[in-house]
Amino acid sequence: MALTEIVFFSIFLMFTLQPSTSVEVFPVLCGTQLIRFPFRLNTQPGRCGYPRFDLSCKNEAHAILTLPFSGGFTVVNIDYTFQNIWIEDPDSCAPRRILQGLNLAGTPFDLLEPRSYTFFNCSSASSTVPKLAEAKLISCLSGKDFSVVAIPTERLDLPASLSTSCSEMAKVLLPLSLSDWSDPGDGFILTWNEPDCKLCESRAGTCMFKNDTGTDVGCSGGFNDGMFYFAVTQVG
C-alpha cells in the first residue's frame, strides 16, 4: 500500500469513528475535583452528563453525590478510566451509613468487590476483644465502654475469632475499600458499568453522546487501533 493511501485511509478512519454530534461538553471543577462525562453538576445542561450521574457542588469546594434512598456523600475522587467513584460520609463514619442501610436502588452504581462482614459490639472491659488479623475496629462507632468491630463472615468459625463478651449487631456487605483499608471510616468505592467508556478513556479520548438525542455514547479524539496499526505497518 502506498504511503499516500495509508495516510488517506488513516484520516478517513479517524473521522468516521467520531460521534456525529457537534455539541462539545467541557469539564468543570468543583473544588479540586474535575467533573466530566458521564457526570455533570446539577447546574449544567442535562446533555452534559449521562442520566442519574448528577452531582452538586457544595460551597464551590466539595462535590456531593446524593443517593436517592441513602442521602448525600462527599466525592473524594473519580477514576474515569476504571469507572470507580470514591465517596465518604461527611461525618467521617461510612460504616454507620452502611449499617443504617446503604440502598443503591435507582442509581447506576454497585459496590466494588463486596465482601460479607459481621459487626459486633464488644465490651471494652474484656481483654478478649477479637484479635483476628482481619478484624476491623470501627473507631467512629466505638465508645468509652465498648468497641465495635467487623469480622469477615467466613472467618467466624475460627476458635479465636470471637469473644463471649461480643454481641452481634448485623451482617452487611462492605465494598473493597472498607474491607481492606486500616481505617474503615475513610469512605468506600462504588463502580458503574453503563455507560461503558473504559476503552475510550484508555485511549485518551473524550466519551460523549453520539447524537443530540438518545443515550448511545461514542468516543471523540484520542487514538485508535486502526491508526496505530497502519503506522506500525508503514515502519515495518
Image: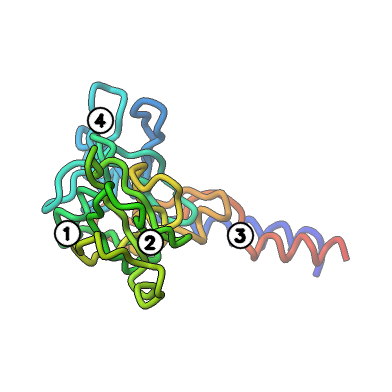
Residue 57: mark in rendering: 4
Identify the residue at horizontal 77%, vertical 58% (top origin): 4
- Image vertical order of residue 197 relative to residue 43, above or below: below
Of callouts 2 and 1, the N-terminal one:
1
Pair 3/1: label in front: 1
| Image location (x, y in percent) of residue 78 | 41, 44
Give neighbour class at mark 2: few <14, some 14-19, many 20+ (Cα, 10 Å).
some
Q: CA distance from mark 3 to mark 2?
A: 29 Å
Give neighbour class at mark 4: few <14, some 14-19, many 20+ (Cα, 10 Å).
some
Secondary structure of residue under mark 4: strand
Pair 1/4: label in front: 1
Contact? badges 1 and 4 (CB < 8 Å): no
Residue 103: mark in rendering: 1
Inspect the image, locate mark 1, and give the three-letter code of the amino acid beneath it. Asn
* Residue 90 quadrant: top left
Residue picked out by circle 3: 224
Closest to the observer, 116 or 219 = 116
Q: CA distance from mark 3 to mark 1?
A: 38 Å
Q: CA distance from mark 4 to mark 3?
A: 34 Å
Inspect the image, locate mark 2, and give the three-letter code of the amino acid beneath it. Leu
Contact? badges 4 and 3 (CB < 8 Å): no
| Image location (x, y in percent) of residue 13 | 59, 62
- Image vertical order of residue 231 relative to residue 47, above or below: below
Closest to the observer, 147 or 67 = 147
Visible in this render: residue 8? Answer: yes
Of callouts 4 and 3, the N-terminal one:
4
